[in-house]
Amino acid sequence: MCMIVGTLSKIPRHFSSCGEKDKVQLQLECLGKEHVAYQRLDFPLLKVSVVGGRPFSCGGKPLFRKKLLSARYGVKNMDGSANKIQKAALGIPEDHFLILLAHNGPTGLGSGLNDICGKDWEFDSDGDHGDPDLADAISLLKENNQVSIALVVFGHMHKELAHGNGFRKMIVVGADNTIYLNGAIVPRVKRLSDDNKRSLDNEGHHSSLEAKGTSRAFTLVELSEGKVTKVAESWVSVVEDRTVLEEEYILFEAH
């Protein structure tokens, strides 16, 4: 369940002047059928379908990387992008529920600096930095209950706010119980402190305070019968071949 989510410093070509493939093409080839931008990937055993949103999004109203989107996906404007996302989601198996996977979240989830897609680096009257095409696609899919959307998951807008203004809201529960989840915890990997290393070593048979270790963040989602039942931000300590759940913050739990 993967899609290209990075931004690029320049518009890449299929091949460079020396005949080598550009980095985007190499990534697409690595992902193969698991690249879901404007496409759907079905998981019959899990009864889940994943549809990807617009790749290379930078958030906000402008369509970022127009030439790239036009050349690779045939997308020329926001309306075309919204329609392409909607089209990819239509026709999912009747017993499947839908997860939308995008680089950035949709508009309409708040305009405050600490809102899930709110601008935290500048203060103006338009603080909603979500993607309007994703919001339009969601609206189109929800018309006449075309598709049941259990989860919309994305990143881009970092949890830690600019200028030391605290932390961002990372989850929103919609009026129809659709979960909007931001997974952009940065940095995702940290070095373990000496105290954390000692705690982890005490749980194993080998005590080595010199062992190098990291703490790694995961956003875990539990689903049951087409609904999200639990969302947690989890930090796992990794020292050599040993792993321990260090911290868990419950973001959502169904009652």
Image: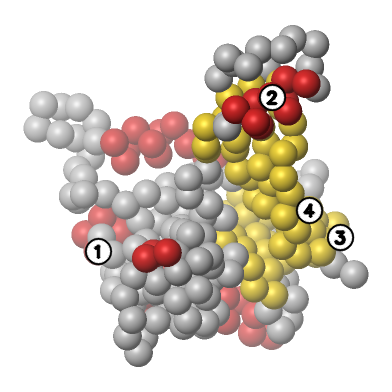
Mark 2–mark 3 distance (CA, rounded to whole Å): 41 Å
Q: Nearer the viewer, residue 226 or 245?
A: 245
Measured as percent of width and height from the top left, residue 129 is found at 40, 74
Marks 3 and 1 close (CB-CB < 8 Å): no
Q: Nearer the viewer, mark 3 or mark 4?
A: 4
Q: Amino acid at mark 3?
A: Glu
SS under mark 4 = strand
Q: For the image shown, how many numbered marks are present on the structure?
A: 4
Q: Which numbered disc covers residue 198?
A: 2
Mark 2–mark 1 distance (CA, rounded to whole Å): 51 Å
Q: Amino acid at mark 1?
A: Lys
Can residue 85 be seen from the camera position used here? no
Q: How crowded is the residue under tag 2: few (<14 C-alpha within 10 Å), some, or many (20+)?
A: some
Residue drawn at (74%, 10%) of the image: 206
Mark 1 vs 4, N-terminal side: 1
Look at the image and tell me in which quarter the N terminus lies. top right
Q: Which numbered disc covers residue 222?
A: 4
Mark 2 vs 1, N-terminal side: 1
Q: Which numbered disc covers residue 225?
A: 3
